[in-house]
Protein backbone atom coordinates (compact mmCIF):
# COMPACT_ATOMS: atom_id res chain seq x y z
CA UNK A 1 0.00 0.00 0.00
CA UNK A 2 2.78 2.42 0.92
CA UNK A 3 4.59 1.60 -2.30
CA UNK A 4 1.46 2.30 -4.36
CA UNK A 5 1.02 5.64 -2.58
CA UNK A 6 4.64 6.55 -3.32
CA UNK A 7 4.21 5.70 -7.02
CA UNK A 8 1.03 7.80 -7.18
CA UNK A 9 2.76 10.74 -5.47
CA UNK A 10 5.74 10.55 -7.85
CA UNK A 11 3.42 10.38 -10.84
CA UNK A 12 1.57 13.49 -9.63
CA UNK A 13 4.82 15.40 -9.23
CA UNK A 14 5.81 14.47 -12.76
CA UNK A 15 2.50 15.65 -14.17
CA UNK A 16 2.90 18.96 -12.36
CA UNK A 17 6.39 19.41 -13.79
CA UNK A 18 5.14 18.60 -17.30
CA UNK A 19 2.39 21.18 -16.88
CA UNK A 20 4.85 23.79 -15.60
CA UNK A 21 7.25 23.22 -18.50
CA UNK A 22 4.35 23.40 -20.95
CA UNK A 23 3.23 26.72 -19.49
CA UNK A 24 6.79 28.06 -19.59
CA UNK A 25 7.15 26.88 -23.17
CA UNK A 26 3.98 28.71 -24.20
CA UNK A 27 5.02 31.95 -22.48
CA UNK A 28 8.53 31.88 -23.98
CA UNK A 29 7.22 31.03 -27.43
CA UNK A 30 4.68 33.87 -27.42
CA UNK A 31 7.30 36.36 -26.23
CA UNK A 32 9.65 35.27 -29.00
CA UNK A 33 6.89 35.42 -31.62
CA UNK A 34 6.26 39.10 -30.87
CA UNK A 35 9.83 40.19 -30.03
CA UNK A 36 13.10 38.40 -30.85
CA UNK A 37 12.76 35.19 -32.91
CA UNK A 38 14.91 33.07 -30.59
CA UNK A 39 12.41 30.18 -30.63
CA UNK A 40 12.85 29.55 -26.91
CA UNK A 41 9.71 27.40 -26.92
CA UNK A 42 11.38 24.87 -29.19
CA UNK A 43 14.43 24.82 -26.92
CA UNK A 44 12.25 24.08 -23.88
CA UNK A 45 10.64 21.11 -25.65
CA UNK A 46 14.14 19.69 -26.25
CA UNK A 47 15.06 20.27 -22.59
CA UNK A 48 11.87 18.57 -21.42
CA UNK A 49 12.67 15.50 -23.48
CA UNK A 50 16.27 15.12 -22.36
CA UNK A 51 15.47 15.61 -18.66
CA UNK A 52 12.06 13.94 -18.25
CA UNK A 53 12.25 11.30 -20.96
CA UNK A 54 10.57 10.60 -24.29
CA UNK A 55 6.96 10.37 -23.11
CA UNK A 56 7.07 13.57 -21.09
CA UNK A 57 8.94 15.35 -23.87
CA UNK A 58 6.24 14.36 -26.35
CA UNK A 59 3.53 15.51 -23.92
CA UNK A 60 5.18 18.91 -23.39
CA UNK A 61 5.59 19.42 -27.14
CA UNK A 62 2.02 18.49 -28.07
CA UNK A 63 0.34 20.35 -25.21
CA UNK A 64 2.45 23.48 -25.63
CA UNK A 65 1.86 23.73 -29.37
CA UNK A 66 -1.90 23.31 -28.95
CA UNK A 67 -2.05 26.09 -26.34
CA UNK A 68 0.22 28.35 -28.43
CA UNK A 69 -2.17 28.06 -31.35
CA UNK A 70 -5.03 29.22 -29.17
CA UNK A 71 -3.27 32.59 -29.27
CA UNK A 72 -1.70 32.33 -32.72
CA UNK A 73 -4.58 30.69 -34.55
CA UNK A 74 -5.87 27.13 -34.80
CA UNK A 75 -6.16 25.35 -38.10
CA UNK A 76 -5.30 22.23 -40.06
CA UNK A 77 -1.65 22.95 -39.34
CA UNK A 78 -2.11 22.54 -35.56
CA UNK A 79 -1.96 18.74 -35.60
CA UNK A 80 1.19 18.76 -37.73
CA UNK A 81 2.86 21.28 -35.42
CA UNK A 82 1.86 19.29 -32.33
CA UNK A 83 3.32 16.09 -33.77
CA UNK A 84 6.50 17.83 -34.94
CA UNK A 85 7.12 19.51 -31.56
CA UNK A 86 6.28 16.30 -29.71
CA UNK A 87 8.75 14.31 -31.79
CA UNK A 88 11.48 16.82 -30.92
CA UNK A 89 10.96 15.86 -27.28
CA UNK A 90 11.02 12.16 -28.17
CA UNK A 91 14.32 12.49 -30.06
CA UNK A 92 15.92 14.41 -27.19
CA UNK A 93 14.84 11.73 -24.74
CA UNK A 94 16.22 9.00 -27.00
CA UNK A 95 19.71 10.35 -27.79
CA UNK A 96 20.72 11.80 -24.40
CA UNK A 97 21.64 10.11 -21.15
CA UNK A 98 18.78 10.42 -18.70
CA UNK A 99 19.19 11.90 -15.24
CA UNK A 100 19.22 8.49 -13.57
CA UNK A 101 19.52 8.34 -9.81
CA UNK A 102 21.27 6.08 -7.37
CA UNK A 103 20.14 5.37 -3.82
CA UNK A 104 21.79 8.57 -2.59
CA UNK A 105 20.05 10.55 -5.38
CA UNK A 106 23.30 11.62 -7.00
CA UNK A 107 23.03 12.56 -10.68
CA UNK A 108 24.40 10.15 -13.25
CA UNK A 109 27.95 11.43 -13.96
CA UNK A 110 27.38 10.80 -17.67
CA UNK A 111 24.30 13.04 -17.63
CA UNK A 112 25.73 16.44 -16.73
CA UNK A 113 29.19 16.55 -18.27
CA UNK A 114 31.51 19.34 -17.09
CA UNK A 115 34.29 18.89 -19.63
CA UNK A 116 35.70 21.81 -21.57
CA UNK A 117 34.48 22.64 -25.05
CA UNK A 118 37.03 20.37 -26.75
CA UNK A 119 36.05 17.53 -24.45
CA UNK A 120 32.37 18.10 -25.20
CA UNK A 121 33.15 17.99 -28.92
CA UNK A 122 35.03 14.72 -28.63
CA UNK A 123 32.57 13.07 -26.23
CA UNK A 124 30.02 11.86 -28.73
CA UNK A 125 29.23 15.14 -30.44
CA UNK A 126 31.66 15.04 -33.35
CA UNK A 127 30.51 11.88 -35.16
CA UNK A 128 26.91 12.97 -35.98
CA UNK A 129 28.20 16.32 -37.25
CA UNK A 130 30.80 14.66 -39.47
CA UNK A 131 28.21 12.25 -40.87
CA UNK A 132 25.81 15.08 -41.71
CA UNK A 133 28.54 17.12 -43.42
CA UNK A 134 29.70 14.03 -45.33
CA UNK A 135 26.12 13.31 -46.46
CA UNK A 136 25.72 16.92 -47.61
CA UNK A 137 28.99 16.65 -49.54
CA UNK A 138 27.72 13.56 -51.33
CA UNK A 139 24.47 15.37 -52.16
CA UNK A 140 26.39 18.32 -53.59
CA UNK A 141 28.62 16.06 -55.68
CA UNK A 142 25.52 14.32 -57.07
CA UNK A 143 24.12 17.73 -58.05
CA UNK A 144 27.40 18.69 -59.74
CA UNK A 145 27.47 15.45 -61.72
CA UNK A 146 23.97 16.24 -62.95
CA UNK A 147 25.01 19.84 -63.76
CA UNK A 148 22.31 21.13 -61.46
CA UNK A 149 24.04 22.34 -58.29
CA UNK A 150 21.34 24.97 -57.66
CA UNK A 151 18.93 22.23 -56.55
CA UNK A 152 21.22 21.26 -53.67
CA UNK A 153 19.43 23.79 -51.44
CA UNK A 154 16.19 21.85 -51.48
CA UNK A 155 14.95 18.37 -50.70
CA UNK A 156 18.50 16.94 -50.92
CA UNK A 157 19.55 19.14 -48.00
CA UNK A 158 16.88 17.47 -45.85
CA UNK A 159 16.99 13.94 -47.24
CA UNK A 160 20.76 13.37 -47.34
CA UNK A 161 21.28 15.35 -44.12
CA UNK A 162 18.70 13.29 -42.22
CA UNK A 163 20.34 10.06 -43.38
CA UNK A 164 23.74 11.30 -42.20
CA UNK A 165 22.22 12.47 -38.90
CA UNK A 166 20.66 9.07 -38.19
CA UNK A 167 23.81 7.24 -39.28
CA UNK A 168 25.91 9.39 -36.94
CA UNK A 169 23.92 8.35 -33.88
CA UNK A 170 23.85 4.70 -34.95
CA UNK A 171 27.61 4.64 -35.47
CA UNK A 172 28.17 6.45 -32.19
CA UNK A 173 26.66 3.47 -30.31
CA UNK A 174 26.14 5.45 -27.14
CA UNK A 175 23.95 8.21 -25.86
CA UNK A 176 25.15 11.77 -25.54
CA UNK A 177 26.05 13.56 -22.30
CA UNK A 178 24.14 16.75 -21.62
CA UNK A 179 26.47 19.64 -22.44
CA UNK A 180 25.80 23.03 -24.06
CA UNK A 181 27.46 21.82 -27.27
CA UNK A 182 25.58 18.52 -27.58
CA UNK A 183 22.26 20.19 -26.72
CA UNK A 184 22.82 22.87 -29.37
CA UNK A 185 23.93 20.30 -31.96
CA UNK A 186 20.93 18.02 -31.43
CA UNK A 187 18.57 21.02 -31.37
CA UNK A 188 19.86 22.38 -34.68
CA UNK A 189 19.66 19.12 -36.61
CA UNK A 190 16.40 17.98 -34.99
CA UNK A 191 14.62 21.22 -35.75
CA UNK A 192 15.96 21.46 -39.30
CA UNK A 193 15.45 17.85 -40.40
CA UNK A 194 12.54 16.71 -38.26
CA UNK A 195 10.41 19.80 -37.62
CA UNK A 196 11.20 21.40 -40.97
CA UNK A 197 10.75 18.14 -42.88
CA UNK A 198 7.37 17.42 -41.28
CA UNK A 199 6.00 20.95 -41.66
CA UNK A 200 7.03 21.21 -45.34
CA UNK A 201 5.20 17.95 -45.97
CA UNK A 202 2.21 19.24 -44.01
CA UNK A 203 2.15 22.44 -46.05
CA UNK A 204 1.65 20.33 -49.19
CA UNK A 205 -1.55 18.94 -47.73
CA UNK A 206 -2.65 22.38 -46.47
CA UNK A 207 -2.51 23.66 -50.02
CA UNK A 208 -4.52 20.70 -51.26
CA UNK A 209 -7.20 21.40 -48.64
CA UNK A 210 -7.34 25.10 -49.51
CA UNK A 211 -7.71 24.45 -53.24
CA UNK A 212 -9.91 21.40 -52.57
CA UNK A 213 -7.98 19.25 -54.99
CA UNK A 214 -5.39 16.52 -54.77
CA UNK A 215 -3.68 17.49 -58.03
CA UNK A 216 -1.19 19.67 -56.13
CA UNK A 217 -0.03 16.69 -54.04
CA UNK A 218 2.97 15.61 -56.09
CA UNK A 219 6.73 15.41 -55.83
CA UNK A 220 7.38 18.55 -57.86
CA UNK A 221 5.38 20.74 -55.48
CA UNK A 222 6.95 19.01 -52.50
CA UNK A 223 10.43 19.78 -53.85
CA UNK A 224 9.45 23.43 -54.29
CA UNK A 225 8.24 23.57 -50.70
CA UNK A 226 11.52 22.16 -49.39
CA UNK A 227 13.39 24.68 -51.53
CA UNK A 228 11.36 27.66 -50.27
CA UNK A 229 11.23 26.40 -46.68
CA UNK A 230 14.97 25.84 -46.22
CA UNK A 231 15.84 29.46 -45.21
CA UNK A 232 13.11 29.59 -42.54
CA UNK A 233 13.96 26.14 -41.21
CA UNK A 234 17.64 27.08 -41.00
CA UNK A 235 16.79 30.29 -39.10
CA UNK A 236 14.45 28.38 -36.77
CA UNK A 237 17.12 25.75 -36.09
CA UNK A 238 20.03 28.13 -35.52
CA UNK A 239 18.03 30.45 -33.21
CA UNK A 240 16.76 27.54 -31.09
CA UNK A 241 20.31 26.11 -30.93
CA UNK A 242 21.75 29.45 -29.78
CA UNK A 243 19.03 29.79 -27.15
CA UNK A 244 19.66 26.32 -25.70
CA UNK A 245 23.44 26.80 -25.87
CA UNK A 246 23.21 29.97 -23.75
CA UNK A 247 20.50 29.04 -21.26
CA UNK A 248 19.95 25.28 -21.53
CA UNK A 249 22.54 24.12 -19.01
CA UNK A 250 21.20 26.23 -16.13
CA UNK A 251 17.63 25.18 -16.87
CA UNK A 252 18.56 21.49 -17.01
CA UNK A 253 20.27 21.74 -13.63
CA UNK A 254 17.17 23.34 -12.10
CA UNK A 255 14.95 20.56 -13.41
CA UNK A 256 17.38 17.92 -12.12
CA UNK A 257 17.29 19.63 -8.72
CA UNK A 258 13.49 19.35 -8.68
CA UNK A 259 13.71 15.66 -9.61
CA UNK A 260 16.18 15.08 -6.81
CA UNK A 261 14.03 16.93 -4.26
CA UNK A 262 10.95 14.84 -4.97
CA UNK A 263 12.89 11.61 -5.43
CA UNK A 264 11.76 10.52 -8.88
Image (cartoon, grey):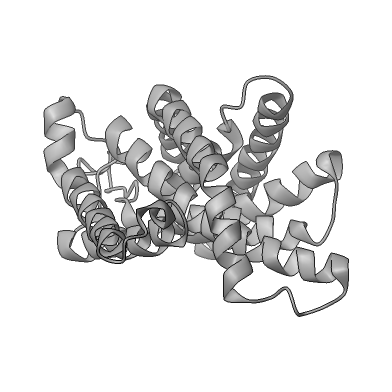
Residue located at (28% from left, 56% from top): 140
Residue 194 visible here: yes
- Residue lying at the far front in this picture: please name it: 147
Quarter of the figure that contains the N terminus: bottom right
Whether residue 241 sits left or right of residue 44 in the image: it is left
Quadrant of res 22: top right
> From what the image shows, is residue 224 above or below residue 126?
below
Q: Nearer the viewer, residue 210 or 255?
A: 210
Residue 10 visible here: no
> From what the image shows, is residue 262 above or below residue 9?
above
Residue 165 horizontal/vertical position (percent) = 30, 58
Quadrant of res 41: top right
Residue located at (61% from left, 27% from top): 37
> From what the image shows, is residue 19 above or below residue 75?
above
Residue 74 horizontal/vertical position (percent) = 85, 52
Quadrant of res 187: top left
Amino acid sequence: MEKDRRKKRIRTHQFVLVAMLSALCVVCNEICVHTLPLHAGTAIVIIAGLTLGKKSGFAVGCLSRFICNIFDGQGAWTLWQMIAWGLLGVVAGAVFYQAERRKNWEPNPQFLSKKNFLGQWQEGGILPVICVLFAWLIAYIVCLLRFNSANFIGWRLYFYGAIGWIAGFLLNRKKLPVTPFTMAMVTFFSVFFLYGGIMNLGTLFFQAMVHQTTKSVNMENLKLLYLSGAPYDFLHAICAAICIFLFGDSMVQKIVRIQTKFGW
